[in-house]
Image: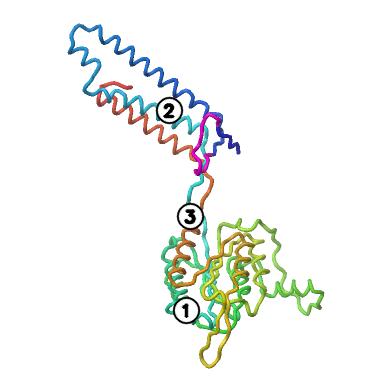
């Protein structure tokens, strides 16, 4: 793409510089000052001709002192229309927000025992459930959403669907369990997005044992062949993973993130709870929980997504609002020639309409 900006034009600092596919056409803008000078010359000639009339009233009518400003409006509109059409001929490209083609989102939500902690009111689990349900309301109705609940293991709580009632019911059914398997959550989410790809949890264990040179008792089912794609390039689906603790069991979440990255799926991670860690006790037992931000950031970075920290219920709500906007609108470089052409055509029609209304002639 040719992004040359003509030297005679100076764009204000701090604003993104416009891009043009055919910037050489912008040199035609130099014709505008010439047309302005030509118009001013015609006006002077008109005044000289007007003084030849014998009657002063006729002179005033010719010059049109009472509505003199009206005579200049149609030509000014025509000049602006010409400028817009010249810019359109240069085929401008701008970064605009357009509806995303995101079709499926997987909510992978932590249901480990630490989610009952009350540092996020009323507690972490209820805050996460409320935020997730608000997130569902903000999404377009044609976006499918699936729910994966994970603790010591990961299970599909609801297959991807557009039925929001089924999703809310699945979220309300969460039951707290022990341990945290963040890697399993990513793998199960991928298996849900690609049900025919042969993605299995055993695959990562098999690859790890083979890398370590250990004997392989039983090989997992062979994955369907696929060609890795650039991270974040798969725009039809995304995963949002919310957790309040570090991985205590299951597959390595960074290895699982690589599986997502190879398939172009973004994994947005949301951390909720205490970063420094604290001891939480209930039902006669206690445990030390700590938010592993480094791993969550690594997962997001590897999959070309983002990490968010939510220390309060309000923060969590804002995170989901931000994700809703991000997943339903995406910024793209788009040619906006038609907008400038439409503006030019509208100005031409307006100039012609005003000229006919005021002077019964075209400009």
Q: Residue 41's mark?
A: none
Q: Residue at x 25, y 9 (%)?
A: 51
Does the magenta segment cover residue 7? Answer: yes
Check disc 2 and report its element: helix, strand or loop: helix
What's the coloring here? rainbow
Q: Earlier in the sequence, mark 2 or mark 1?
A: 2
Of 63 and 100, nearer the camera is 63
Instruction: Indicate the position of residue 230 as horizontal and vertical percent values.
Output: 65, 56
**Mark closer to the observer (1, 3):** 1
Does the magenta segment cover residue 17? Answer: yes
Instruction: Indicate the position of residue 301 as horizontal and vertical percent values.
Output: 62, 62
Q: Earlier in the sequence, mark 3 or mark 2?
A: 2
Q: Which residues are magenta?
A: 6-18
Instruction: Indicate the position of residue 47 as horizontal and vertical percent values.
Output: 29, 13
Q: Residue at x 57, y 75 (%)?
A: 291
Up-down relation of residue 63 to residue 278 (above or below)? above
Check disc 1 and report its element: helix, strand or loop: loop
Up-down relation of residue 166 to residue 37 (above or below)? below
- Categorize mark 1 by other alpha carbons within 10 Å: few (<14), some (14-19), many (20+): some
Is residue 241 toward the left or the right of residue 312 in the image?
right
Q: Residue furthest bottom?
A: 284
Of 197 and 89, nearer the camera is 89
Q: Residue 329's mark?
A: 3
Residue named by callout 2: 82
Residue named by callout 1: 119
Q: Residue at x 64, y 61 (%)?
A: 263
Kindly report the secondary structure that dominates the magenta region of the rendered protein. Answer: loop
Check disc 3 and report its element: helix, strand or loop: strand
Which quarter of the rendering shows the C terminus? top left
Q: Could you tell me how many numbered marks the image carries?
A: 3
Is residue 213 toward the left or the right of residue 238 in the image?
right
Up-down relation of residue 332 to residue 89 (above or below)? below
């Amino acid at each position: 793409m040719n992004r040359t900006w003509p030297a005679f034009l100076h764009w204000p600092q701090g604003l993104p510089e416009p891009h043009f596919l055919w910037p050489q056409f912008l040199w035609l803008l130099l014709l505008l000052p010439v047309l302005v000078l030509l118009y001013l010359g015609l006006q002077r000639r008109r005044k000289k001709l007007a003084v030849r009339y014998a009657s002063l009233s006729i002179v005033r009518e010719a010059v049109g002192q009472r509505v003199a400003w009206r005579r200049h409006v149609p030509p000014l509109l025509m000049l602006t229309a010409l400028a817009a059409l010249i810019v359109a001929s240069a085929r401008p490209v701008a970064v605009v927000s357009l509806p995303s083609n995101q079709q499926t989102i997987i909510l992978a939500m932590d249901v480990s025992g630490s989610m009952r902690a009350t540092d996020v009111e009323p507690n972490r689990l209820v805050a996460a459930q409320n935020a997730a349900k608000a997130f569902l309301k903000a999404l377009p109705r044609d976006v499918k959403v699936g729910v994966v609940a994970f603790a010591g293991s990961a299970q599909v709580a609801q297959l991807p669907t557009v039925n929001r009632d089924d999703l809310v019911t699945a979220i309300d059914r969460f039951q707290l369990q022990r341990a945290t398997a963040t890697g399993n959550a990513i793998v199960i989410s991928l298996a849900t997005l690609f049900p025919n790809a042969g993605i299995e949890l055993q695959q990562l264990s098999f690859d790890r044992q083979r890398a370590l040179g250990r004997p392989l008792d039983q090989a997992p089912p062979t994955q369907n062949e696929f060609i890795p794609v650039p991270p974040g390039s798969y725009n039809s689906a995304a995963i949002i993973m919310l957790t309040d603790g570090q991985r205590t069991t299951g597959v390595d979440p960074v290895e699982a993130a690589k599986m997502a990255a190879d398939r172009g799926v973004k994994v947005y991670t949301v951390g909720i709870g205490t970063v420094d860690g604290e001891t939480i006790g209930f039902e006669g037992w206690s445990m030390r929980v700590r938010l592993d931000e480094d791993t969550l950031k690594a997962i997001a970075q590897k999959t070309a997504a983002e990490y968010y920290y939510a220390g309060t219920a309000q923060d969590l709500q804002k995170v989901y609002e931000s994700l809703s906007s991000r997943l339903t609108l995406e910024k793209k470089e788009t040619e906006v020639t038609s907008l400038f052409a439409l503006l030019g055509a509208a100005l031409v029609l307006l100039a012609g309409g005003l000229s006919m209304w005021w002077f019964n002639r075209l400009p």
